[in-house]
Amino acid sequence: MRRTIALSVAASTALGLAACDDVTGPDSGEPGYYPVAIEGEWRGQALPGDLLEIKGISGDIGASAATGLEVVVRWTKRARHGDPAGVTVEVIRHANGITICAVYPNPPGRPKNKCLPGEQGNMVVQDNDVSVEFSVAVPTGVELSARTVSGDIDADGLRSYVFGSTVSGNVSITTSEFADASTVSGSIDASIGRSNWDRDLAFTTVSGSVSVTIPGNTNAEVWATAETGTVASDFALPELQDGTIRGTLGAGGALLRLATVGGSIELRRGS
């Protein structure tokens, strides 16, 4: 049965989880400035193969490797004009893992905002400048999906599959496994440690550059396109036309897709 956990000590105690919500921050004295930052934390166990989703709207998402099976998620809510207390953080356990969302107040006349797994749910923000920054410790083998609209994504030193998506921001990923990433206005820098993948991988942006490092013994099909920039590769891959390369690495396999419109692409050979 799916459980929705509100940000409260009572709910977390009843479910054997840990959560807190502390208010800190100096008063700037500036008219219209909300003088506090609200911090919170959630802890819970996840197993290899589980999916951990972090879904934000405004704010960075940072991820690092956990030392055990415990997922630790911390967040800080800030605003210049809005009320950070009006934005809640909801946690949902489901069959595939854990989904954590920043849930904003419902805009008048619009469908209710809902935190749901994957592509489900609804989150509309109207004239609300509250940002929610997330920091998460991810256990080995727990897949991470980090999504925001305005903010950077930085996943460093993970030991599992990583998906990072933003609209306005940069994405940086290093993992011993493999990854996907997308942005619209921003650059992508990724390093993956696994040389064979069970799915196609894509690293795409519109306005920004893409740099991806893969093992030297990778088996994959590669297709890289930079519409107005250059494509550079440490691997001997045929150039179909200016700004486009396509070819096979090793014995071939899943597709590695790299694409940008207003930037350049680098495919680098790792160890």
Image: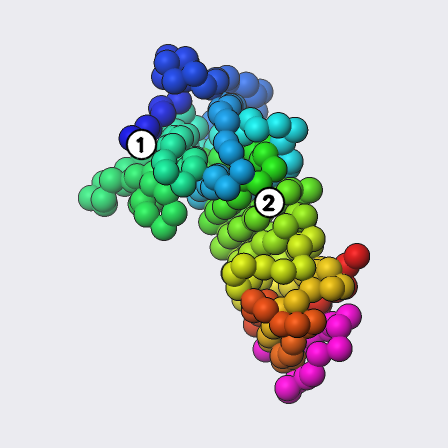
Q: What kind of element bears circle 2?
A: loop
The residue sitting at the front extreme is 251
- Name the spot of residue 236 as percent of width and height, x first: 75, 77
Which residue: 58% across, 54% down? 179
Decide which of 77, 121 is in the foreground and name it. Answer: 121
Establish if 48 lies above or below 25.
below
User: Is 231 inside the magenta-drawn segment?
Assistant: yes
Question: Is residue 58 visible in the rendered structure shown here?
Answer: no
Q: Quadrant of residue 105?
A: top left
Question: Is residue 245 visible in the rendered structure shown here?
Answer: yes
Q: Amino acid at mark 1?
A: Arg
Which residue: 63% across, 31% down? 66
* Magenta stretch: dominant secondary structure: loop
User: Is 241 inside the magenta-drawn segment?
Assistant: yes
Which residue: 61% across, 63% down? 208
Decide which of 130, 225 is in the foreground and name it. Answer: 225
Q: Quadrant of the C terminus?
A: bottom right
Which residue lies under the disc numbered 1?
Answer: 2
- Chain part drawn in magenta: 227-242
- Name the spot of residue 50 as percent of width and height, x first: 48, 39
Look at the numbered discs 1 and 2 and tell me whether their residues touch, using CB distance below 8 Å: no
- Name the spot of residue 196 as percent of width and height, x first: 63, 60
Query: Reading the chain from its start, which is encountered first: label 1 or label 2?
Result: 1
Q: Amino acid at mark 2?
A: Ser
Q: Is residue 214 left or right of residue 203?
A: right
Which residue lies under the disc numbered 2?
Answer: 160
Q: What kind of element bears circle 1?
A: loop
Q: Is residue 179 left or right of residue 268?
A: left
Q: Quadrant of residue 242?
A: bottom right
